[in-house]
Amino acid sequence: MKATVILVFLVFASLVQGQQKMAQEDPAHSHCQMMKRGEKGMGFSQQTTTHHFLLLADGGAIEIETKDAKDTGTRDQIRQHLSHVAKDVFRRQFRDPHIRS
């Protein structure tokens, strides 16, 4: 019985410590990790692009544009990515493990 109480206490303490560690994470680090996942999943720099998330009466839309109009390389990467997304959504097979991992 005493061993069970100690085990429960240790598990509880471990969970609390994990929650505290997550709460103390640097927001800049979390943002950096998100940007890396985005670049890996989308195939273009998140630093050189801007995303616009729009709420519409029939759902929504995401617009992505380059910050520099002369950056045709990134523009082409955006077009390629959105073409793949559109095809996947049309086939109802949209899954991108790079973004969710």
Image: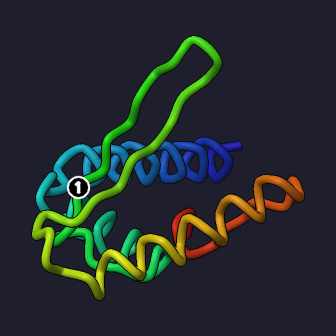
Q: Quarter of the image containing the C terminus?
A: bottom right
Outermost residue on the bottom side: it is 73
Q: Which residue is located at x 16 percent, y 71 percent? A: 48
Q: How many marks?
A: 1
Q: Position of residue 92 (x, y in %)?
A: 87, 53
Rendered location of residue 18, percent (x, y): 37, 53
Q: Residue at x 14, y 69 (%)?
A: 69
Q: Position of residue 94 (x, y in %)?
A: 75, 60
Image coords of residue 82 (percent x, y): 55, 65
Name the residue beneath numbered marker 1. 50
Q: Secondary structure at mark 1?
A: strand
Seen in the picture, residue 1 relative to 94 is either above or below; the reply is above
Crowd rating for badge 1 (residues with CA inside 10 Å; few <14, some 14–19, many 20+): few
Q: Is residue 2 left or right of residue 69?
A: right
Decide which of 46, 37 is in the foreground and name it: 46
Task: Classify the position of the N terminus by image quarter.
Answer: top right
Residue at the spot 51% in from the left edge and 18% down from the top edge: 56
Which image quarter: residue 30? bottom left
**Residue 28 located left or right of residue 44:** left
| Residue toward you, 27 or 2 | 27
Instruction: Please report the residue visible at 29 percent of the width from the left and 68 percent of the height from the top.
Output: 35
**Whether residue 86 is situated above or below residue 70 in the rendered picture:** above
On screen, residue 83 above or below 59? below
Q: Specify the farthest residue to the top.
A: 57
Q: Amino acid at mark 1?
A: Thr
Query: How was the colour assigned to the protein in this rendering?
Result: rainbow
Q: Is residue 34 left or right of residue 47?
A: right
